[in-house]
Amino acid sequence: MDRILLSTVAYRPPEEVFPYVRSFTEYPRYTEHLKGVRVDGNGDAGSVYDLQLAWWKLTYTASSKVTAISPPESLEWRLVEDVDARGEWRVEPEPEAAPADAETASRIFFEALYDPHSADESAISLPRFVSIDRIVDRVRPRLVEEAETVVERLVEDIEGDRRDVELTIHEIP
């Protein structure tokens, strides 16, 4: 299993941060490769989100299910088909990280665990003469870049202003 774990600080309390983490339908604003999100459910545990992705010559819809939710601390998810993947958004209070002009702060963690070799080749429309191994080699570094971009733009949305966001990379493949 590959693992991506990164975090950053938002200058808001967890109760204000968590609704942004939970709002998957807003995620297309955070990355150019997510073209749309369709939700089946009300956003609670059991809800399924169809994430319509496009990158390079590939298009794919990932179905992600919320498996557990504990506002304002944690939201766990897993892909329901085609790839063995799961992860968590976690929000922890970190008031000591707040600058002088902010009342408090929270650390936002994004974690994804996935087996890139578990991908169902029939679910992905690969270009002719392109192997799944070649795709895995090309996608692996892009996943880390995408996670970083999503977290940076999420903080901008939470705080309402763009700023340099310091990302802490805890683990990458």
Image: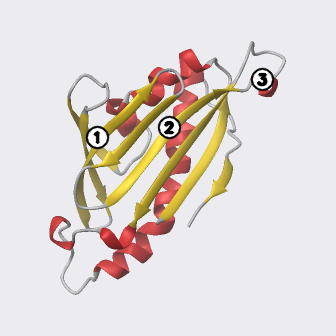
Q: Left of 150 or right of it: where is 22?
A: left
Decide: marks 2, 1 in contact (CB < 8 A)? no
Q: Earlier in the sequence, mark 2 or mark 1?
A: 1
Numbered disc 3: secondary structure: loop
Numbered disc 2: secondary structure: strand
Amino acid at pointer 3: Ala
Q: Residues within 10 Å of mark 3 (few under 14, many from 20)?
A: some
Q: Which mark is residue 54?
A: none
- CA distance separating discs 2 and 3: 20 Å
Residue 66, percent across and down? Answer: 33, 36
Position above or below: 76 against 137: above
Which residue carries the number 3 mark? 98
Which residue carries the number 1 mark? 65
Which residue carries the number 2 mark? 89
Query: Which dot, 1 or 3, sits closer to the camera?
Result: 1
The type of colouring in the image is secondary structure
Residue 39, percent across and down? Answer: 22, 32
Residue 2, percent across and down? Answer: 49, 65
Amino acid at pointer 2: Trp
Q: Left of 65 or right of it: where is 96?
A: right
Rendered residue at 41%/68% (across/down): 139
- CA distance separating discs 1 and 3: 33 Å
